[in-house]
Amino acid sequence: MAADLLAFFIALFASLMLVVPVRALALRVGMVDLPGPRKVHLTPIPLLGGLAMHVAVVIAVLFAFNGPARAQIVGILIGATLVAGVGILDDRGLLHHQVKLFVGMPLAATILLVSGIRAQVFSVLVGGRSGDFLDAVLTVVWVVGITASFSILDHMDGLCAGVAAMASVFFAMLAYLNGQTLVTTLAAAVLGAATGFLRWNFKPAKIFMGDGGAMFLGYLMATLGLKLRLENSNHLSSWLAPILILGVTVFDTTLVTISRSRRGLLPFATPGKDHAAHRLSNLGLGHRGAVLTLYVLGAIGGGAAVLVTYLSARMAFFVGALALGIIFAGVACLERAPYERQTPKTSNAS
């Protein structure tokens, strides 16, 4: 518990303090997000906020871990640094958006595999080399999918950081209940960094995290999902829990994927104000109301994840089926909600 609290407070303080010089650096080098027809903000906002969170997490975990645990965390930090760097280059306009999706994210997932971090679904169900191969493929798909979902989730002040912070609470809780020190401490560090950043990013935002920050958070969320082991729960509950914790991003990604595909657009390459938060805002909740609603949904998903760990496999299957039904019902309802239309033009925005 001492290491967890230490990681949280170090990351919180570092994130709060580092935003100030990082914001000044972004303004100095011209890394700002300009207003536009697909943007919510009306004035130029500095990017690079993800750099502050990245440094805060690195400092926190290096102070909190020692010995074998520190060696194990190095692989995670290397992958996290890779996706953060690719995202920053993308923010700077130095990379095509497909590079981060088809090169950066899969490469970071491969680093996890080399570090011994992988899904354990098919190795239990099938066994042998076939199970190991399928788990390796699932690991890459999971890491790329969750990282990309956070990349496109960063479209409203305070949304991405807040959703990541909420998910970190439940990852830390489940890991603590199952005696997983490394996962608990890493989740606490992410919680501290994201919470500190929210001081500057909640509406009205003074700085954006940029794609570097969103991809960094997404990658760490995917990693926490892979590292979480629920030894006293059934196999179905073990892999269902991370999905429920990250239910908000799964829902938003499902919504924009289905909606944009039906309109002949590329889901991860076409920008627009058609996300769940945009539609909720247009329904009368406003910017803050929409963001806070998604925070609440994140808490509900996290609560369901904790609940499912105490259920039998049959009941866990029922909860999973119910969650899937709610996601598609929500997509069907929000697809009818008003949003600003966009033209079929690809971009690296969200």
Image (spheres, rainbow, N blue to C red):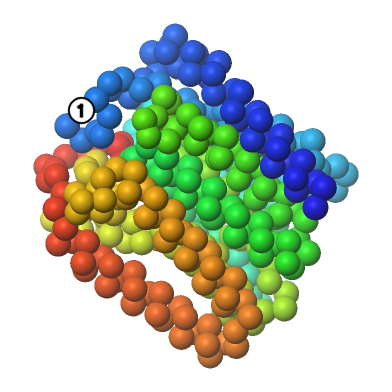
Question: In the depicted view, which residue is nearer to us: 266 or 280?
Answer: 280
Q: How many marks?
A: 1
| Crowd band around label 1 with a 10 angstrom C-alpha radius: few (<14), some (14–19), many (20+) | few
Give percent across and percent down for residue 70: 80, 43
Q: Which of the 4 image quadrants contains residue 58? A: top right
Residue 95, image x and y in percent?
Answer: 38, 29
Secondary structure beneath label 1: loop
Q: Residue furthest top?
A: 28
Residue 290 as seen in the image, left or right of residue 270? right
Left or right: where does residue 27 sit relative to residue 261? right
Rendered residue at 70%/62% (across/down):
175
Residue 92 visible to an observer of this rendering: no
Which corner quadrant of the image does residue 52 belong to?
top right
Looking at the picture, tell me which residue is in the foreground, 292 or 208: 292
Up-down relation of residue 240 to residue 64 (above or below)? below
Q: Position of residue 264 (x, y in %)?
A: 14, 54
Residue at image coords 54%, 68%? 303
Q: Quadrant of the C terminus?
A: top left
- Residue 147 picture location, percent across and down: 47, 49
Is 260 above or below relative to 272? Answer: below
Residue at horizontal 73 percent and vertical 41 percent from the top:
7
286 and 73: which is toward the camera: 286
Query: Which residue ends up furthest to the right in the rendered image?
Result: 67
Amino acid at the residue labelled 1? Gly
> Is residue 244 shown left or right of residue 233?
left
* Residue under label 1: 36
Residue 282 at least partly seen = yes
Q: Residue at x 54, y 18 (%)?
A: 20
